Image: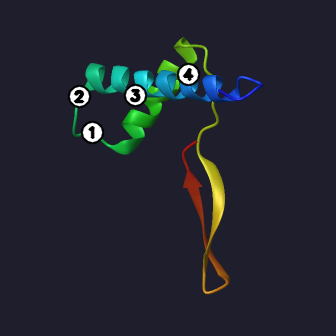
């Protein structure tokens, strides 16, 4: 652990996020659309008191030219 405890906080957050993902998967099962799992995670994060941002939009470039705005979950 580093002096400010950051490593511990990051490890704990990773465990919480993985736990949320497993809870969603265990509840609704396999084989659904990605958006369905995203929405389930939003519910689970809120229930666990975790703050999050969903569907950030980032530009996509090809050979230096912007070709699209693409949403990225986060």
Q: Secondary structure at mark 1?
A: loop
Instruction: Give the mark, 4 or 1, whose residue is nearer the N terminus.
Output: 4
C-alpha separation, residue under disc 4 versus residue under disc 1: 28 Å
Please state which of residues 41 and 9 is positioned toward the viewer in this rendering: 9
Is label 1 in contact with label 2 (beta carbons under 8 Å)? Answer: yes
Numbered badge on residue 32: 1
Numbered badge on residue 21: 3
Q: Is residue 51 above or below residue 59?
A: above
Q: Is residue 56 above or below residue 70?
A: above
Label 4, residues with CA under 10 Å away: few <14, some 14-19, many ≥20: few
Residue sitting at x 59%, y 39%: 54
Please state which of residues 24 and 10 is positioned toward the viewer in this rendering: 10
Q: Secondary structure at mark 3?
A: helix
Query: On the rendered structure, is 24 left or right of 68?
Result: left
Is label 3 in contact with label 1 (beta carbons under 8 Å)? Answer: no
C-alpha separation, residue under disc 4 versus residue under disc 2: 25 Å
Instruction: Give the mark, 3 or 4, whose residue is nearer the N terminus.
Output: 4
Q: Mark 2 — residue? A: 29
Residue sitting at x 48%, y 24%: 15
Please state which of residues 34 and 7 is positioned toward the viewer in this rendering: 7
Q: Nearer the viewer, mark 2 or mark 3?
A: 3
Q: Mark 4 — residue? A: 12
């Amino acid at each position: 652990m580093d002096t400010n405890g950051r490593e511990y906080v990051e490890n704990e957050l990773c465990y919480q996020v993985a736990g949320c993902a497993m809870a969603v998967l265990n509840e609704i099962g396999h084989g659904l659309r990605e958006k369905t799992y995203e929405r389930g995670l939003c519910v689970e994060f809120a229930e666990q008191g975790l703050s999050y941002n969903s569907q950030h939009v980032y530009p996509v470039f090809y050979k230096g030219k912007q070709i699209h705005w693409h949403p990225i979950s986060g």
